[in-house]
Image (cartoon, rainbow, N blue to C red):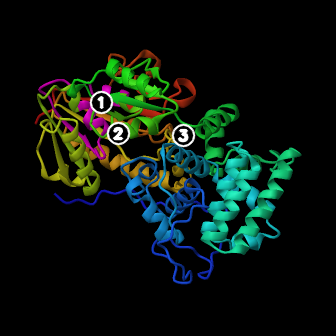
Amino acid sequence: MEGTLSLPSLPPSTFPRRRHSSRLTCAVGPPRPTLHRATQNLNPTISPHRAVAAVRLLRVEQGGAFADLLNDKGKGSAENEMGYVERTLGFRTRDLDGRDMRLVTDIVGGTVRWKRYLDHLIMSLCHHERMYQDMEPLLLQILRIGLYEILKLDMPPYAVLDENVELAKVALRPGAGNMVNGILRKLVLLKEKDSLPLPKVEGDDRAQARALGIIHSHPVWMVRRWRRQFGCEDAMRLMNWNNTEPSFSIRVNSRKGFTRTDLIMQLEKLKVPYEISLHMEDFVRVTTGLQIVIQAGLLRDGLCSIQDESAGLVASTVDPQPGETIIDCCAAPGGKTLYMASQMRGQGAVYAIDINKGRLRILEETARLHQVDDVITAIHSDLRDFAEKNSTKPDKILLDAPCSGLGVLSKRADLRWNRRLEDLEELKDLQDELLDSAAKLVKPGGLLVYGTCSIDPEENEERVEAFLLRHPDFVIDPVDKYVPCAFVTAKGFFSSNPLKHSLDGAFAARLIRSPDEKQ
């Protein structure tokens, strides 16, 4: 079934504005016709991880899927990586080894995370503002990589200088290499003197937020919003959390008979450090070494999947049981769908509804890989259309609604640059519409779980309060029977918070329809 459900169009960050002349723009795609160089030749002088990182950063900035570019299933996967570099930069470099792959992931994630901070320094180190504003996108990415490596990875400055200068010369022209050399040398001198040109936190609220936004690399509207909602100290702590290297949780696929003990044995064999989840039986957390796990094939073989414990806890509030019928609204790419299906032991049905056909296809493929496809049925539809045309009354419904993603900025660093304050208003309207549509499918006495990956009260508690005013036949059912008490709010909702639980931020509310409602 076809539908129209989609997120609002979200424009890129507007800080800082740069004017690109068509003469200077390095587009991601086929080689630029002005290069006139043979693209078949291997260039062994270029650091391969820096070349790949520069191309990935271009793709992220021009609309690429950030998460996909950082794993082995996205368009930037290893088998396509070198060809993409060749088409974009005009030369080939050697294939990436495991260490290179991990460096690319670290550099791309960190550079996106610290973009506002890095751009402020680059602009400050240019001779004049126009020099920064007219800078080619590729040259800007190379400079960001260099600054990030020197300031945040503490790499030897001489190595960073030499290799990024060489990359700029070969991928662009000798003059670009000279610019990289001059800016990075200035940076090294200022770092040694501990005199980086950063703003002082002073003045009114807006001026302080602007300074903090540069120092901690966040949009000003987020800084102001968090200072107002959580207080100045917690807003600072939240930004620091978002800027740290994220840890990842791995969920074992019990349907394949793979246990947490089996996963731990594999991690020890691979020498990947881990922590056992304090909250979920099927989860293990890794801070470093995720790429090693991916390359070992554990995900490819369907033995486990990457899923934050907060997402698992949201699915736990549904309390899926064998034999039940569950609708997962806005389901793709299906992490919660798969987890719920694995709990049903091959009995019952999970209907996964989503508007995105491509992401639904991924869900179906993963369901087969995880051997839960006998439970899961994918339905391509707008939830609002589906609710109008179907009289289906399942036992339970999960609406994991489209949201700002403000709880997952540690892992999705690009989201901070792809969200505006105005988007929250549009998302709130969409969340209300989807809640109303989901409510039509709930049978008397049935359960509707509303969830987000946001920490913003307007998307969470306030949406539930507004829903209950519109639907007095629903009541809150406390989540304390389904998740640890540390995650239960005073009103009986589930809430995970990075500052309290060292997990992604997420929210869920259990809403029960009155059993006296006539069908």
Q: Nearer the viewer, residue 267 or 390?
A: 267
Q: Nearer the viewer, residue 215 or 494?
A: 215
Percent from the top left, x then y, of residue 454? Answer: 47, 39
Q: Which one is in front in this view, the residue at disc 1 or the one at disc 3?
A: 3
Q: Please tell me the numbered disc located at residue 467.
A: 2
Residue of label 3: 410
Q: Is residue 184 above or below residue 150?
A: below
Q: Which one is in front in this view, the residue at disc 2 or the one at disc 1?
A: 1
Marks 1/3: CA distance?
29 Å
Which three-letter amino acid code belongs to the residue tagged 2? Phe
Residue drawn 55% across the image and 56% down it: 48
Q: Please tell me the numbered disc located at residue 511.
A: 1
- Is the residue under label 1 in contact with that under label 2 (CB below 8 Å)? yes
Q: Magenta residues, as a range?
A: 313-340
First of labels 3, 2 by sequence position? 3
Percent from the top left, x then y, of residue 8? Answer: 41, 59
Marks 2/1: CA distance?
10 Å
Q: Residue 164 occupies which quadrant of the picture?
A: bottom right
Q: In the rendered view, does 302 fall on the left or right side of 40?
A: left
Looking at the image, can residue 356 be seen?
no
Looking at the image, can residue 443 be seen?
yes
Q: Is residue 53 above or below residue 306?
A: below
Residue drawn 77% across the image and 63% down it: 181
- Is the residue under label 2 in contact with that under label 3 (CB below 8 Å)? no
Q: Secondary structure at mark 1?
A: strand
**Figure label count:** 3
First of labels 2, 1 by sequence position? 2
